[in-house]
Amino acid sequence: MNLFNTQLIEYLEQNACDITEKWLQTRAPIGKSVYAVKDDKIDALLREQNRFTIKTIISSLCDDQTAYKENSEEWAKTVAKSRAESETPIYEVLDVVSKFKQIFIQYMESFFDNHTDASQKQMMPSMVTVGKAFDDLYVKFTEHYYHYTTAKLEAQQELIRELSAPIIPITDSIGVLPLVGDIDTKRAKTIVEVIPVQCMQQKITHLSIDLSGVPVVDTMVANQLFQLIQTLQLLGVTSMISGINPAFAISSVQLGIDFENVETHATLKKALEKMGLNTNI
């Protein structure tokens, strides 16, 4: 590493605290993102992360790029996870990092001003390197932020799908699965995977699958229902279908769906009565 870069790095390291404080002053108390909240713990977190940002950018100026590669990857993972968990919009993060970049560049320019003997040939490579480092951080951050937010969204959607197919216990061994609304491929797959597990957990031996709230049946839905019933049968759970309305029945006939080997009832009440429950109480 040449003497000029060594002195630049030392200067930036010596002024790291000042750079961080100047950056923190750019925060606007607008909205509910992590940057707008005034809290000692959050302030401490932002200071720590910003110091790591400075360390990462400075390491890009070293001849050996090993430290920079490690730092940039760790920075992107850490900050992306933190911002995703705090639900800070990505555009706010990029705006804040952009402001920090301007401050960092200002300190570099200040160093150059104090070294009038330095030539453009010495200064330009450093400026270019730092510019590329920031661009690299943008890309790595957005990539990790996308992965974290996508994983979080998928987990939420999975929870919603599970909640969309709950077994309601009627007695210690009898349960009802009320299905409501359209059943798409993902929801049908969730039902087939989740319901047998719920039956085992709740020790359900008799289950009525109520379709009163399902407006349309197609071949996919019917096949998934058959698969569910067969799976439950293997687990020792007796199941039947209730709530088959005229539109459902007509659609089934038109599609050639055969419910001959499946016990069906027009209403949930009749299904429960078949299970031995007195519904007149």
Image (tube, grey):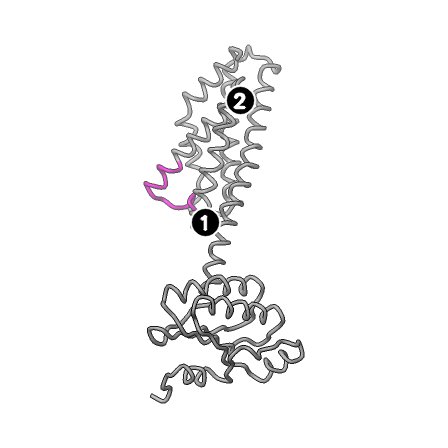
* Residue designated by label 1: 87
From the top left corner, tell me how far across and down residue 136 is, in percent: 57, 32
In the image, is 235 to the left or to the right of 244?
Answer: left
Q: What residue do we see at 42% from left, 62% from top?
A: 197
In the image, is 91 to the left or to the right of 177?
Answer: right
From the top left corner, tell me how far across and down residue 91 is, in percent: 53, 45
Q: SS of the residue at dot 1? A: loop
In the displayed structure, 135 sits above or below 245; it is above
The front one of 119 and 203 is 203
Mark positioned earlier in the residue sequence (2 or 1): 2
* Residue designated by label 2: 65
From the top left corner, tell me how far across and down residue 77 is, in percent: 47, 37
Identified by mark 1, the residue type is Glu
**Is residue 232 shown in magenta?**
no
Q: Residues within 10 Å of mark 1 (few under 14, many from 20)?
A: few
The front one of 191 and 259 is 259
Residues under labels 2 and 1: Cα distance?
32 Å
How many tags in the picture?
2
In the image, is 129 to the left or to the right of 203?
Answer: right
* Quadrant housing the C terminus: bottom left
Report the mark closest to the observer, 2 or 1. Answer: 2
Q: What residue do we see at 38% from left, 86% from top?
A: 279
Q: SS of the residue at dot 2? A: loop
Report the span colored magenta: 30-46
Q: Residues within 10 Å of mark 2 (few under 14, many from 20)?
A: few
**Is residue 38 shown in magenta?**
yes
Q: Which mark is residue 219?
A: none
From the top left corner, tell me how far across and down residue 148 is, in percent: 49, 46
Identified by mark 2, the residue type is Gln
The front one of 83 and 131 is 83
Q: What residue do we see at 42% from left, 36% from top?
A: 24
In the displayed structure, 1 sits above or below 279; it is above
